[in-house]
Image (cartoon, rainbow, N blue to C red):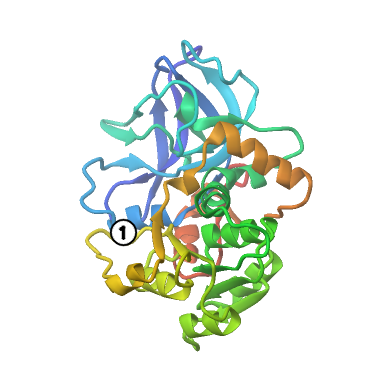
């Protein structure tokens, strides 16, 4: 790099269950295939909550950086990088695209080392593997771009790529956090009818209605399977589970129709939890599917999602209404955990 030492402010997970520590860390020299990005906005995903609390199992990488979706501007490129150039606006995603696949980097924090994966976004500058970047078209805001890399990719992708409904088929979405809301939007764009949103928080159901849900079910007061079957006699054609709760995964499968109904599990359960199924549900001709980031191929799908934004067929305003400075990232995590916001955004310009 041209100047040394180069540092950045970052939120560091030092101990699971404890607040992230905001401090300066030193950025190392770029390896071949790495890119230094000035982070504009970072999304905050439920996955980070799991990591924060240690619900993904023993964490052998502590201390480390967090964050896996965002937007920013390329500040410097390492040897061999051809996908982006200095000054390019980019989408950052944990899902691998084309380009070099570099495992990660290690920052220096005083006398300690801080681990980092191929992508982290809870910092004002971050060293990113080339294959986690996609050029951002003009006309798409940094706020919108910040959630394209996970919430939109996984939510829309679970509909467009994994389930592939035809117009007029019915879709239920169980769990209306960031990814679930994007699944609702994807179902509406795909022409599904009805589009049923299920959650226990009225605010999330209101957001789902703004994104295209034709029906909403408050699962804290009503049995979601019974309600879905009342709206769709025989069951919905498809269901997306986006809560991460095994009991909701069971409900998603129970809610789809016999002989062809399919449910996809998107949510991440806590480490050690298990899903128990009645085999009869499968004997009835139903399918339970998994998905890896909505089966999104970034180089193919992210430009498509940007075109939907440009055409105003996709709106993300109900999803991205709440911004925090990096200094308040622990508050953002708590608000996400308590359901006070659907998808917190960390705006690096606010500090």
User: Left or right: 293 with respect to 54?
Assistant: right
The answer to whether residue 320 is visible is no
25 versus 155 height, above or below: above
> Disc count in the image?
1
Q: Quadrant of residue 306?
A: top right
Question: Which residue is nearer to you in this view: 73 or 225?
Answer: 225
Element type at mark 1 = helix
Q: Residue at x 54, y 59 (%)?
A: 178
Q: Residue at x 50, y 39 (%)?
A: 93
x and y percent of residue 96 in the render? 45, 33
Question: Which residue is nearer to you in this view: 83 or 217?
Answer: 217
Residue bearing the label numbered 1: 53
User: Left or right: 195 with respect to 113?
Assistant: right
Quadrant of the frame with the C terminus: top right
The answer to whether residue 8 is visible is yes
Say few, some or many: other residues with alpha carbon within 10 Å of mark 1 (under 14 / 14 to 19 / 20 or more).
some
């Amino acid at each position: 790099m041209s100047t040394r030492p180069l540092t950045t402010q970052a939120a560091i997970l030092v101990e699971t269950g404890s607040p992230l520590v905001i401090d300066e860390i030193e950025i190392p020299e770029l390896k071949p295939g790495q890119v230094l990005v000035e982070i504009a906005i970072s999304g905050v995903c439920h996955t980070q909550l799991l990591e924060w609390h240690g619900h993904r199992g023993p964490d052998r990488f502590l201390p480390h950086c967090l964050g896996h979706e965002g937007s920013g501007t390329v500040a410097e490129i390492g040897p061999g990088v051809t996908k982006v150039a200095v000054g390019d606006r980019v989408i950052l995603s944990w899902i691998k695209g084309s380009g070099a696949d570099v495992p990660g980097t290690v920052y220096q924090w005083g006398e300690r080392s801080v681990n980092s994966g191929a992508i982290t976004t809870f910092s004002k500058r971050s060293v990113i593997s080339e294959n986690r970047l996609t050029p951002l078209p003009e006309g798409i805001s940094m706020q919108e771009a910040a959630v394209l890399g996970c919430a939109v990719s996984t939510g829309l992708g679970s509909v467009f790529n994994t389930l592939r409904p035809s117009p007029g088929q019915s879709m239920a979405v169980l769990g209306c956090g960031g990814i679930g809301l994007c699944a609702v939007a994807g179902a509406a764009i795909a022409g599904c009818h009805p589009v049923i949103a299920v959650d226990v928080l009225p605010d999330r159901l209101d957001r789902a209605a703004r994104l295209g849900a034709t029906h909403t079910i408050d699962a804290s007061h009503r049995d979601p399977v019974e309600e879905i079957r009342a709206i769709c006699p025989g069951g919905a054609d498809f269901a997306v589970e986006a809560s991460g709760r095994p009991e909701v995964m069971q409900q998603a499968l129970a809610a789809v129709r016999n002989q062809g109904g399919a449910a996809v599990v998107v949510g991440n359960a806590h480490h050690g939890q298990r899903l128990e199924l009645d085999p009869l549900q499968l004997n009835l001709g139903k399918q339970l599917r998994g998905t890896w980031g909505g089966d999104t191929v970034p180089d193919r799908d992210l430009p498509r999602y940007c075109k939907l934004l440009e055409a105003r067929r996709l709106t993300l305003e109900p999803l991205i209404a709440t911004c925090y400075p990096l200094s308040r990232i622990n508050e953002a995590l708590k608000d996400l955990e308590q359901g006070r916001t659907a998808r917190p955004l960390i705006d690096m310009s606010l500090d």
